[in-house]
Image: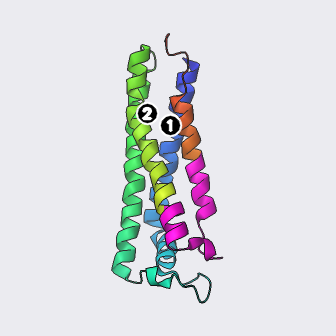
Amino acid sequence: MPIRLCKILVVANSCFFLLMVVFNNTFDSNSNYQFVRHVLSMDTTFPGNTGMWRAITSPILHKAFYATLISWEAAAAVLLGLGVIQLWRARAGDAQGWRRAKTLAVVGFSLSLTQWYLAFISVGGEWFLMWQSRIWNGQDAAFRMFTMMGISLIFLCLPDGELAP
């Protein structure tokens, strides 16, 4: 039972973290929006960059990207939150019920991992060459988030003596 409680706590911490990200992106929207705008515009990449044809300079598309990122983070947070509830209810149950209760949390972690890996590391980092920017390079932060969520997912999925409650 203590390992199950630890797993519930890790999922709850991850949910709380994503809720804080959504909160900050919503209530400090201009500074976080500027990050998205500069990455998509590629206006701080190396001078003479031959990949500038990829740049998106439309403010409407910047706002759409930004809203999509916030919605994505919110969806992952909701799934993790619902996962916490399911895990809490199954904490003293049998192994099969406990494994089933992990489903929403696993999906929430996977959604979050996909965001950090696909949207930030792959699309932002490589397609929009964010790695070239000294000011608007979020790859280290994205890697940190990907790692945090990945380790949490692995911990949740590790067998923990699920044969007994």
Residue 32 is situated, as x and y percent measured from the top left of the image, at 50, 70
Q: Quadrant of the N terminus?
A: top right
Tell me, yes or no, whether the highlighted magenta stretch contains residue 81: no
Residue at 50% over, 76% down: 34
In the rendered image, the vertical position of residue 107 relative to residue 162, given as above or below: below
SS at mark 2 in the image: helix
Type of the residue with mark 2: Val
Tell me, yes or no, whether the highlighted magenta stretch contains residue 137: yes
Residue 154 picture quarter: top right
Which badge, 2 or 1, is on the more N-terminal residue?
A: 1
118 and 96: which is toward the camera: 118
Residues in magenta, as a range:
120-147
Res 55 seen here:
no
In the rendered image, the vertical position of residue 122 relative to residue 37, given as above or below: above
Q: Residues within 10 Å of mark 1 (few under 14, many from 20)?
A: many
Dot 2 and dot 1 residues touching (CB under 8 Å)? yes
116 and 8: which is toward the camera: 116
In the rendered image, the vertical position of residue 44 relative to residue 29, given as above or below: below
Q: Residues within 10 Å of mark 2 (few under 14, many from 20)?
A: many
**Image-based side of 83 in relation to 44, left or right:** left
Residue 52 is situated, as x and y percent measured from the top left of the image, at 50, 84
Residue 125 is situated, as x and y percent measured from the top left of the image, at 55, 67
Type of the residue with mark 1: Val
Look at mark 2 in the image and give the residue it sits on.
84
Report the predominant secondary structure element of the magenta stretch: helix
Q: Which residue lies furthest to the front in this view?
A: 50
Residue 55 is situated, as x and y percent measured from the top left of the image, at 45, 81
Instruction: Please give the label number shown on residue 11.
Output: 1
Residue at 59% over, 74% down: 136
Residue at 46% over, 61% down: 119
Residue 150 picture quarter: top right
